[in-house]
Each structure stands twice: as structure tokens, then as C-alpha cells.
Image (cartoon, rainbow, N blue to C red):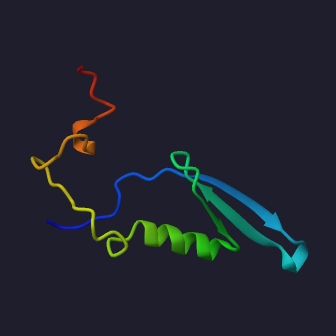
Amino acid sequence: MMKQPPAYVSYLLRLWQSGEGKDARWRALLESPLTGERHGFANLKDLFAFLDSLTSVAAHPEIEIRTRGQASAGSEEEYNPNNKEE
């Protein structure tokens, strides 16, 4: 099977500027609502690099892609919020 990054990740994103004028820089903080884990970033470039690595196949070799018909219990394919059947 092919590998892929997590299909769903949730973070609260906080952005703020520090410094003034030419020295102003955007800072960022990501916080997981599930675990409370926090990741702070001194600039947006580092934030984007983190998000890129988080969603990179190479960063998550342990996660397998499941194609249709191969869904496991609790997989995203089994949950469809648009499906009104119960």
C-alpha cells in the first residue's frame, strides 16, 4: 500500500506581530485542541515548513493509504457527515 500523511489534523492558530516598523515580524503558535501540545514559530516561514512536514508523506511513513474497499474500522470512509442515513 502507498503511504500518506494524516487525513485530518486540527490546530488552533494564533498569529501576532511583534516589533514595530521595519522590525515588525509575524509570530505564530499552533495548539492541538486534542492534546494541548503547542508549537511556537518565530516567523511564518517556519510555520509553513512545519505544516509542510506535518503533511508530507516522508514525515509519516507509518501511515498507510487505504483505497476504496479497504477501509478499516473507524476510517474516514466509514464516516460521511453528508450521509443522512443512520
Query: Is residue 67 placed above or below 46 in the rendered structure?
Result: above
Q: Residue furthest right?
A: 20
Q: Residue furthest left?
A: 69
Image position, residue 82 (x, y; %): 31, 30
Residue 5 relative to residue 73: left or right? right
Residue found at the far top of this picture: 86
Q: Residue at x 17, y 46 (%)?
A: 72
| Residue at (18, 67) in percent of width and height | 2
Image-based side of 39 in relation to 34, left or right: right
Q: Is residue 75 left or right of residue 54?
A: left
**Can you tell which quarter of the image residue 29 is in?**
bottom right
Q: Closest to the observer: 24 or 29?
A: 29
Residue at far bottom of view: 22
Look at the image and tell me in which quarter the C terminus lies. top left
**Rendered image quadrant of residue 15:** bottom right
Q: Position of residue 14 (x, y in %)?
A: 68, 55
Q: Is residue 3 above or below residue 85?
A: below
Q: Nearer the viewer, residue 19 or 72?
A: 72
The answer to which image quadrant residue 76 occupies is: top left
Q: Position of residue 22 (x, y in %)?
A: 86, 79
- Image coordinates of residue 77 in percent, x first then y, are 23, 42
Position of residue 22 in the picture relative to residue 30 (left or right): right
Give 54 or 35, whichever is nearer the viewer: 35
Q: Residue at x 57, y 56 (%)?
A: 37
Please tell me whether residue 5 is drawn above or below residue 45 in the rendered image.
above
Q: Quadrant of the N terminus?
A: bottom left
Taking the spot 22% from the left edge, 62% from the top edge, the residue there is: 64
Count of marks, rendered view: 0
